[in-house]
Amino acid sequence: MIEVTNLSKVYPDSSRGDFLAVDGVSFQVRAGEIFGLLGANGAGKTTVLRILSTVLTPSSGHAAIAGHDVVTQPELVRRNIGFVSNNTAIYDRMTALEMVQHFGQLHGMSGVKVRDRCDELFDQLRMQDFRDVLGANMSTGMQQKVSIARALVHDPPVLIFDEATLGLDVLVARNLLTIIRDLRTAGKCLIFSTHIMSEVERLCDRIAIMHQGRILDTGTLSELKQRHAEEDFEELFFSLLSEHERGEVKARQSMGASG
């Protein structure tokens, strides 16, 4: 469902030189799978996801969603994805129902179809009690549920969650993780990006660890633990980053000495 091959993104900077935000990233995600994209802030996770959602154009490489190229077929890509982040805008003067219906209509859904789909989603996400509440009067948890419903309204096969639990209280975050598991059971293809390792451990079928624009390693939790001889995943994560940074320092020192 998701194919990423040697993807890179360069941001020009005339004062400091070009900044390589994503550096040759490759991975695949299948239907019925949650793929965790783990990394500290600035690792390049959000840039990758924005390329997949057609917000950004890659500098090189290839990415496809459900067989559609993100550069040459952006409209088809957008029909096949739903995107949820922690800072999705909520319209203050629209109710929860009006917002979700509006996004359904943007995806070409008819009046009857979008109403039926909204009823289904509002039951599934337990939103019926605030369906007529204006965005300006919603709690953070309510807003996040609206964001999820908007992403799901057209029933896309691919869902992208970018730091979706950031800023949520523990109960709302727990409910969101349950929803994501249910989506996997329904056969959806999901990317779950976060810097919270415990969420990745509980949720993801496979994990990619990103650092400074690169994927350092990919595998199931058990594969990563076995490969790095470390049972504590947090220790594994920081050890892998430290090892990578030491290698970069040695490489720079070697280049300096040869120069």
Image (cartoon, rainbow, N blue to C red):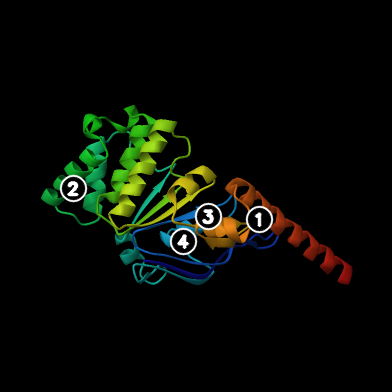
**Residue 169 shows in this picture:** no
Say whether disc 2 or disc 4 marks the residue closer to the N-terminus.
Answer: 4
Mark 4 neighbour class, 10 Å CA radius: few under 14, some 14 to 19, many 20 or more: many
Residue type marked 2:
Arg
> Please, what secondary structure does the residue beneath circle 1 have?
helix
**Quarter of the rendering containing residue 248:** bottom right
**Residue at (34%, 67%) from the top-left corner?**
66
Mark 1 or 2, which is nearer the eye? 1
Residue type marked 3:
Lys
Mark 1 or 4, which is nearer the eye? 1
User: What x and y, as percent, mark residue 144?
Assistant: 36, 38
Mark 1 to mark 4: distance in Å?
26 Å
Q: Which residue is mark 1?
A: 240
User: What x and y, as percent, mark residue 121?
Assistant: 23, 43
Mark 3 to mark 1: distance in Å?
17 Å
Say whether disc 3 or disc 2 marks the residue closer to the N-terminus.
Answer: 3
Mark 4 to mark 3: distance in Å?
10 Å
Residue type marked 4:
Ile
Q: For residue 117, which numbered disc appears in the image?
A: 2
**Residue 71 shows in this picture:** yes
Say whether disc 1 or disc 2 marks the residue closer to the N-terminus.
Answer: 2
Mark 2 to mark 4: distance in Å?
28 Å
> Is residue 134 or residue 122 the one in the foreground?
122
Residue type marked 1:
Leu
User: What x and y, as percent, mark residue 197?
Assistant: 54, 45
Is 116 placed left or right of 228 in the picture? left
Q: For residue 51, which numbered disc appears in the image?
A: 4
Q: Which residue is mark 3?
A: 45
